[in-house]
Image (cartoon, grey):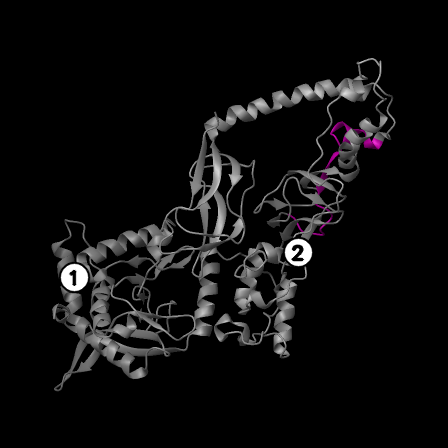
Amino acid sequence: MADLKEARVPDIGDFDDVPVIEVLVAVGDTVAKDQGLVTLESDKATMEVPAPFAGVIRELKVKVGDALSEGSVVAVIEAADAAAPAEQAAPAKAEAPRQAAAPAKAEPPAKAPAAQAPAAAKGGAQEAKVPDIGDFGDVPVIEVLVAVGDTVAKDQGLVTLESDKATMEVPAPFAGVVRELKVKVGDTVSEGRVVAVIEAAAEAGAAAAAKPAEAAQAPAPGPQPAAAPPAAAAPQTPAPMGAGLPPVRFDAEALLPDKVPYASPAVRLFARELGVDLLQVKGSARGGRITKEDVQQFVKAALQGGGARAGAPAAAGGGLNLLPWPKVDFSKFGEIEVKPLSKIKKISGANLARNWAMIPHVTQHDDADITELEELRVQLNKENEKAGIKLTMLAFLMKASVAALRKYPDFNASLDAGGENLTLKKYFHVGFAADTPNGLVVPVVRDADKKGVIEIAQETSELAKKAREGKLTPAEMSGGCFSISSLGGIGGTAFTPIVNAPEVAILGVSKSAIRPVWDGKQFAPRLLLPLSLSYDHRVIDGAAAARFTAFLAQLLGDMRRVLL
């Protein structure tokens, strides 16, 4: 009995009803443990749902546009140990009909031209290959446009390829029924690569018409011999559902909810970079699919005053009227190297661009005298050296920030998308920017108000290590109230950090330095820490920001005040 198990959405943090933007596998695919099944995209991150074990996909429970939460069933998988015997038995069962059919096909003399003999031997199945695509090689497949069993017309797109210069579809070379798909999203193909196996329309139609033809030629009832010619008894390829009918055209707008435009991930990313709301763009490709050219045309129309939808909210991005990104062939100026951005940088880049464009940023700068705090930190590290405990300035910054957030609750809040309601939070989850080889990520220390400085230091160290190893989970990067970006270990005197929406403020910290400070009688050397607080001016005004940074500097100057 088949060992069927369900693959479910794992813990994805505080995210709920996250849309499916890509289905990475098809029924019948063999998947490895941890191989991606579907891709989810929230407003903060793109994540894949992995296969919990190896096996064969027997049923897909979701489609593009569905909204999933933790525990949602994605697919039914037959475990690898159970799927192997079934796959080995399938060729054996298929061999008998082929052997039985061989005499029937060999009995009459060959009537078809020699060139058609191979296709007939395969029941009309022919390969659809990647045509001449110029100088492009190893082009990624970004979209599979058909499924096994679909009826396709001649020149109908089978898959979409996207190079660094163009997006192109591989067309069906003839009409027929898709019997097998040879590629999936993420594969790279070149000219001549087999994309699909298609049963030609003429062969599929002949199979569908076989039974009516036999019935029309059958003699009237009477004393006739019961034996039928061997050719009539030969098994026929079953007619696919819908064979002989016009190619099926689906309405993407009817299949997908309004919040998930019919566009490839690359086009969605392109639109986000330009600040274009795809809900306002009309697709020109098959089934209403939106292409890059459609997005560019929308931007041009917007610049001429005709692109933005009437009544569209400003937060949608359609009212920004951004110019198209300049296209420059840099190779004509000298030697170049093209390197794709990491996935983390692509995701964070789109979020940062949105936050910088949509939030009215103001940055308040101040200095904190941490002379005594640094002495305390060094002393505590010596005392705890044998225990392996190392206190960082970040741990003290988090503890002091929590005290400042308590005193000024508007900083521990989030503004809704419409800019009308402010959510004040009663918990204190503080995020910190962690530098990794692939880009910045922001792990979150939860309930920092309930933890001591040593516990916070240990937790930030563990989270930073997981970030560098790429092992952070979505849950460990969600739920933050306030963020800290510390560049103290690198250098600099001040900078303008970008608010991490939906938060309303972020603290930037630069490198501390010894500077002369007037104490009323003389200049004394003091260790000063530069603070840069960026905030959403819709929620926080300049006076409140100045009070917040002054209070934070006072706490860092004497951490005993945190106890008050």
In front of the other: 316 or 385: 316
Nearest to N terminus: mark 1 or mark 2: 2
In percent of the image, x 77 and y 39: which residue is there? 201
In this view, 426 is above or below 407: above
Residue at 27% across / 62% down in the picture? 429
Q: Badge 2 is on which residue? A: 287
- Under tag 2, what secondary structure? helix
Q: Can see residue 328?
A: no
- Note whether residue 171 is visible: yes
| Residue 529 percent location from the top left of the image | 25, 72
**Where does the magenta region start and end?**
115-137
Does the stretch in magenta take in 122? yes
Q: Position of residue 11 (x, y in %)?
A: 36, 48
Q: Mark 1 is on which residue type?
A: Val
Q: Which mark is residue 378?
A: 1
Q: Choose top left, top right, bottom left or bottom right for residue 308.
A: bottom right
Examine the structure image and report whether residue 287 is included in the region drawn in magenta. no
Q: Amino acid at mark 2?
A: Gly
Distance between mark 1 and mark 2 Cα atoms:
65 Å
Q: Quadrant of the C terminus?
A: bottom left
Q: Secondary structure at mark 1?
A: helix
When the figure is inspected, residue 480 is found, relative to residue 241, above or below; the finding is below
> Nearest the camera: 541 or 311?
311
Q: Are there few (<14), some (14-19), or many (20+) residues within 10 Å of tag 1?
A: few
Task: Say which residue appears at 31% left-offset and 58% top-offset.
Answer: 444
Q: Give x and y (percent) for residue 422.
A: 34, 73
Q: Is residue 174 above or below residue 318?
A: above
Relative to 562, does residue 11 appear above or below in the rendering? above
